[in-house]
Image (tube, rainbow, N blue to C red):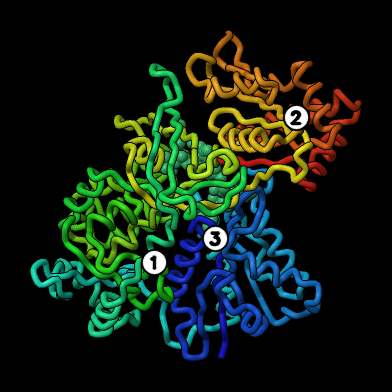
Amino acid sequence: MQHVALLYGSQTGTAQEVAERIARDARRQRLFTNATTTLTLASMDEYDFIHRLPEASCAVFVCATTGQGTNPDSMRRFWRFLCRRALPADCLARLRFAVLGLGDSSYVKFNFAAKKLHRRLVQLGAQPLLDVALADDQDAYGVDSTLEQWLTSLWPLIEKIAPKPPNVDVVPPFVLPPSRAATIFLNRETRQLDPSLNSPSAPALLHLQQQRSYYETASDEAILRLAENALQTTDRASERATGGISVTVRENARLTAAGHFQDVRSIVFDTQEQSTLPDYTPGDVLYLQPHNTPENAELVADMMGWSLDDTFVAVPSGMDHGSPFISNLPRPCSVRDLLTKYLDIASVPRRYFFEVLSYFAMDIRERDKLREFASMEGQEERYSYCNRVRRTSVETLRDFPSVHRQVPFAYLFELFAPIRPRAFSLSSSQAAHARSLHICMAVVNYKTKLSEPRRGLCSNWAAELPPQTTLLLSLGRGTMTLPEDPRTPIVMIGPGTGVAPFRSFVTHRVSTNAPGRNLLFFGSRNAAGDFLYRDEWQSLVAAGKIELFTAFSRDQDAKYYVQHRMLEEDASAAIWSALSDGGVIYISGSAQQMPQDVRAALQQIVVAQTGQSEADAEAYLAQLERVNRLQVETWS
Ligand SMILES: Cc1cc2nc3c(=O)[nH]c(=O)nc-3n(C[C@H](O)[C@H](O)[C@H](O)COP(=O)(O)OP(=O)(O)OC[C@H]3O[C@@H](n4cnc5c(N)ncnc54)[C@H](O)[C@@H]3O)c2cc1C
Ligand SMILES: Cc1cc2nc3c(=O)[nH]c(=O)nc-3n(C[C@H](O)[C@H](O)[C@H](O)COP(=O)(O)O)c2cc1C
């Protein structure tokens, strides 16, 4: 029996989604459909790597990078295992493999986890089928362009290892791919499962019938049995998965001046009881699970012909080895909850969204357009239509009226990804705020060529949370940590909301009487409009607890940012003296241009203070980074 492993390392779900898509493509290619080859799709840590990997004939890895070049949580155990010194150098000699990295080139350690994984597998004797492929969030077309090319090269190589059975053709493109989920609605009166409810439209039914001659899908009876079992269990795992800490909003206040262009908010959550708040340390992050607006949920339900108050049970349809997301939905779940709390209907649609919709378009021009958007050749068009202007899935659905009321309900899980939780640096410290969690959040609103302003999902949802709202959230490790020795000087460079974790650092150091120097560089547009936590910083300066350096970019004619402030004589001297005393430097905030500019300023300071060459100064900074004396937390 041949065994092929399709393994992902994912922090926020993208790598898992890409792996699921590869599995779907493999099924369409009719790979691994014979009795002698099995395909396992799992996270690297879920996979029984100790016993199965050395025996696998082929492994395909999809590997994200998180933090500042760190491995995602779902491959930590696997990576520790691979790094064991005791592993013989040829222990994976049987294995052929390919790695697809998912990363973002605005981070210094671009696709670090994937590159390390590829190197380590080679060291252990495994044979690469292809060079490591590096997808980049900064790529205008997203993961798609790298993925499609990579798969085009990969499939023929895999077919040589695990040949298709003879006389089996690739599934023709007119056949609708199966949905991962099967759904059954409950009768409104009896509250019993009723498979006859919400049955697909006649054209959709034809597609589903045709699909059965190409794919093995679970029978209607098997689905009903699964749904009955699911209904009997009272598993609320989905709520646990999104975070176990129950909190109440105590404060949700604007920090920026009333007329200022941007709304930046201080949100304070109180835990119900002190005992329910797990220990956290400065530098940690809080995850919020946002909701879609009720208007968007209503729009989708309306266009698709579903009633928000209806309830259903979703079970894995047998494809993709069961998606945890589907298994973890409440049972039953209302259409309203699904469209409000679980499915991401407000982000820019993915390529597959267009492909799925194309099967249900009743109008031939709409169908052709959807097919074009779904094709590799049409990616430029798709980019202009939705990515460039940040058109949402809801708006896209509105543009294709002939699909309305045509899409079977279970295909919602194909159209939309789950809503991702968003991270926010904690701006509080447990030493000072025993029962509360604070964040400093910028509300994301911007204009594109579309007439409606674009609104970030989570920040707009959170901005509207009234005091006393109860919700669940979770905490996680960030990438920055305070030095163990409280005497160590720290230099914090945090323009905009990048200052949030430094409020946590400073509060912690002040309330624990840490004697080390605290240098804070803050930057924003203007002192009157968006000097975040101004009063707090100023009283800390007056008390001699921090040294504050500010840069307000629009308070004078020329633009003036934190990196410029760092190069002023007093600031450079202070930074250098902190560094000379073993200090740690932190950079936090937008991942766009700021981290590079700040790093370049640091390099200039080292050159000016030591007379070293630029290359030596860069080597010095790289060394600081290696020993955690230069730490960065940025987001795009
Ligand atoms: C470790 C970490 C810590 C973080 N800490 C904080 C914090 O302390 N405070 C904070 O406010 N945020 C923080 N963030 C960012 C936060 O997680 C969210 O990404 C942010 O709030 C936006 O989420 P949203 O759902 O409102 O927007 P989304 O709906 O996710 O939309 C955001 C997307 O819109 C696009 N976009 C945004 N602005 C523009 C523009 N002007 N033009 C074109 N496209 C644009 C970008 O593609 C962006 O990715 C942090 C992120 C990470 C990873
Ligand atoms: C907090 C955070 C840190 C990241 N750090 C890096 C990094 O150091 N290097 C990199 O190449 N990409 C980095 N990325 C980009 C992710 O690897 C990329 O968005 C990937 O598609 C995420 O996949 P996932 O959703 O499966 O975790 C980071 C993304 C986030 C949100």
Side (left or right) of 388 relative to 396? right
Q: Of label 1 and label 2, which has the lower sequence position?
A: 1
* Circle 2: residue type: Arg
Give the answer, above or below, for where 465 lies relative to 165. above
Find residue 347 and report its horizontal and vertical position in percent.
Answer: 37, 46
Q: Residue at x 52, y 51 (%)?
A: 475
Find residue 342 and report its horizontal and vertical position in percent.
Answer: 34, 56
Badge 1: how crowded within 10 Å, few (<14), some, or many (20+)? some
**From this viewpoint, is residue 144 visible?**
no
Give the answer, above or below, for where 402 lies relative to 60. above
Side (left or right) of 78 relative to 85? left
Q: Of label 3 and label 2, which has the lower sequence position?
A: 3
Q: Residue at x 27, y 84 (%)?
A: 222
Labels in figure, total: 3
* Circle 1: residue type: Ala
Badge 2: how crowded within 10 Å, few (<14), some, or many (20+)? many
Label 3: which residue?
10
Q: Of label 3 and label 1, which has the lower sequence position?
A: 3
Find residue 189 and report its horizontal and vertical position in percent.
Answer: 8, 68
Label 1: which residue?
237
Pointer 2 residue Cβ closer than 8 Å to ligand 1: no
- Secondary structure of the residue carrying numbered label 1: helix
* Quadrant assignment for the N terminus: bottom right
Label 2: which residue?
517
- Secondary structure of the residue carrying numbered label 3: loop
Q: Are marks 3 and 2 in contact (CB under 8 Å)?
A: no
* Circle 3: residue type: Ser
Q: Which mark is residue 405?
A: none
